[in-house]
Amino acid sequence: GQQVMQIPQYQHVQEGEDFTTYCNSSTTLSNIQWYKQRPGGHPVFLIQLVKSGEVKKQKRLTFQFGEAKKNSSLHITATQTTDVGTYFCVLLAAGNKLTFGGGTRVLVKP
Amino acid sequence: GAGVSQSPSNKVTEKGKDVELRCDPISGHTALYWYRQRLGQGLEFLIYFQGNSAPDKSGLPSDRFSAERTGESVSTLTIQRTQQEDSAVYLCASSLVGTGGGANVLTFGAGSRLTVL
């Protein structure tokens, strides 16, 4: 079935620095979603990307959908301790099955 | 309801016992999902309901796992003869289905933490 790879698996970031996490699929996607899970919490929806090459921003977070709709990225600028958590990309596969990537676990060093 | 409600929030059971986990989705959400998350791991898809039907049961780990949904509302996930490897947080999520705004966006419950001794 459709699978997605997220890299890196872990990201240790100094507070104030930028970082990017990537989501790659072997097949063309109809859309892609991103969720954030804080430690001890449950995943919370961040954004959905639908169009080829789409870029959306939420404050310090920038989400991008690749031109071929096979990959996506999340870029966070000026990382803060509130950014700690695991970021998941999610595919909408055939039959409305929403499949999670493995996640990028972000730790912020103050 | 206003959000997705799961019960129990915590369950400790002995190996070999059966457990039932309950999920109350957001009213009007026709899609309902169950995921399993082991400690420090990602989300493992278990089963998906569209209305009361489960078109995809491929994620259920074994025949000890079953799920049902009634009235296009409440769902129960049943694990029979629990094993230690069943210990995890079981997350339920619901969503609207379609192409409009908010469709296929998952709203999660707080999860049911299962510990099998």
Image: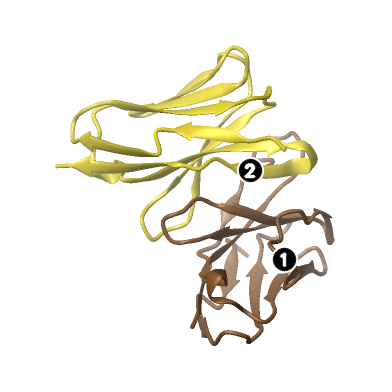
Residue A75 appears in which quarter of the rendering? top left
Q: CA distance from mark 2 to mark 1?
A: 19 Å
Q: Which residue is mark 2?
A: A99
The C terminus of chain A lies in quadrant: top left
The N terminus of chain A lies in quadrant: top right
Which chain is assigned brown?
B
Tell me where residue B80 appears, x and y as whole percent.
Answer: 70, 79
Q: Amino acid at mark 2?
A: Thr
Q: Is residue B27 left or right of residue A44?
A: right
Task: Give above or below for B91 relative to A93.
Answer: below
Which chain is assigned yellow?
A
Tell me where residue A101 appears, x and y as whole percent.
Answer: 54, 40
Q: Is residue A61 left or right of residue B81?
A: left
Residue B93 appears in which quarter of the rendering? bottom right
Closest to the camera, between mark 2 and mark 1, is: 1
Tell me where residue A105 appears, x and y as whole percent.
Answer: 37, 43
Task: Give above or below for B111 relative to B107.
Answer: below
Residue B29 seen: no
Residue B100 seen: yes
**Mark 2 surroundings within 10 Å by alpha-carbon count, few (fewer than 14), some (14 through 19), many (20 or more):** many
**Mark 1 surroundings within 10 Å by alpha-carbon count, few (fewer than 14), some (14 through 19), many (20 or more):** few
Q: Is residue A49 left or right of residue B42?
A: right
Q: Amino acid at mark 1?
A: Ser
Tell me where residue A107 appears, x and y as whole percent.
Answer: 27, 44
Q: Nearer the viewer, residue A43 or B83?
A: B83
Q: Which residue is mark 1?
A: B62
- Colour convention: by chain
Task: Give above or below for B27 relative to A104.
Answer: below
Residue beneath the point at 62% across and 79% down: B82
Q: Count every numbered label the image shows and give the total.
A: 2
Q: Report the chain holding disc 1.
A: B
Task: Give above or below for B42 relative to A32.
Answer: below
